[in-house]
Amino acid sequence: MFSPRPVTCSMFTCRFTTTFDNVDLGDLMFSLCYLPTAGRLTITIIKARNLKAMDITGASDPYVKVSIMCEGRRLKKRKTSTKRNTLNPVYNEAIVFDVPPENIDQISLLIAVMDYDRVGHNEVIGICQVGNDAESLGREHWSEMLSYPRKPIAHWHPLTEWTTQVTATGNGSCNSLKGPPSP
Ligand SMILES: [Ca+2]
């Protein structure tokens, strides 16, 4: 299902993007590891390659922002350090979230590679998602993580364009990462 795409307007152009073009935004490699007994989800951002250049220098200042999503809402977020003036950054930075086993099926991770700018807004270079309801590789990587607990599993993921996220109207079952109250 396609989300509505933003209209991009400037003084000279006004276009409506409706398809996922083969825009090469680059790839991100990260590993996922889940410890069910400790309820600990670790995503290690390893490196990125061939990122899209966002600055007039011909490079970008990439950092990676990881958000836990539940029913379209962001519950928590963490980010890596920023690597300056590169399109092939290496991070090897682990980000740890507490996710109890009873919640692991409800959440997904939204991983956004961002370009830091000293002036103005930081821009999204590209995103990828992993989770039960993610597409193809994002879903496969997630189920592989769950099938092999305690084992870090790394894959390259192609980055896709950021689209405006539809704000889901969930039933509030995951306002927090705590389980439902006991009767
Ligand atoms: Ca920049």
Image: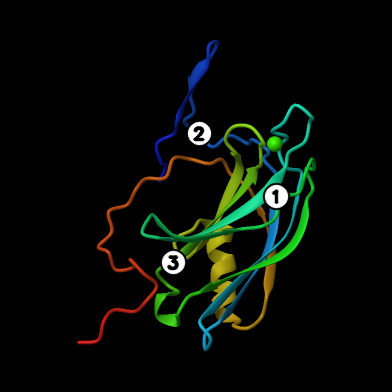
Q: Quadrant of the C terminus?
A: bottom left
Farthest residue to the left: give it. 183
Q: Residues within 10 Å of mark 3 (few under 14, many from 20)?
A: many
User: Closer to the N terminus: mark 2 or mark 1?
Assistant: 2
Q: CA distance from mark 2 to mark 3?
A: 27 Å
Q: Number of callouts in the render?
A: 3
Provide residue 179's location: percent of width, then percent of height: 34, 79
Circle 2/circle 3 CB separation < 8 Å: no
Q: Is residue 27 left or right of residue 169?
A: right
- Residue 64: x and y in percent read 64, 53
Q: Looking at the image, which is closer to me, 107 or 91?
A: 91
Residue position for label 1: 27
Identified by mark 1, the residue type is Asp
Give the mark toward the camera: 1 or 3. Answer: 3
Between disc 2 and disc 3, the foreground one is 3
Real-space Cα separation, disc 1 to disc 3, in angstroms: 23 Å
Q: Which residue is the site of mark 2?
A: 19
Label 1 environment density (alpha carbons within 10 Å; few <14, some 14–19, many ≥20):
many
- Tell me: 130 left or right of 26: left
The residue nearer to you, when weighing 155 against 102, is 102
Residue at 66% across, 80% down: 151
Q: Which mark is residue 107?
A: 3
Q: Quadrant of residue 59?
A: top right
Precedes in sequence: disc 2 or disc 3? 2
The single residue placed furthest to the top in the displayed view is 12
Q: Would residue 34 be found to the left or right of residue 156 on screen? A: left
Q: Dot 2: what SS?
A: loop
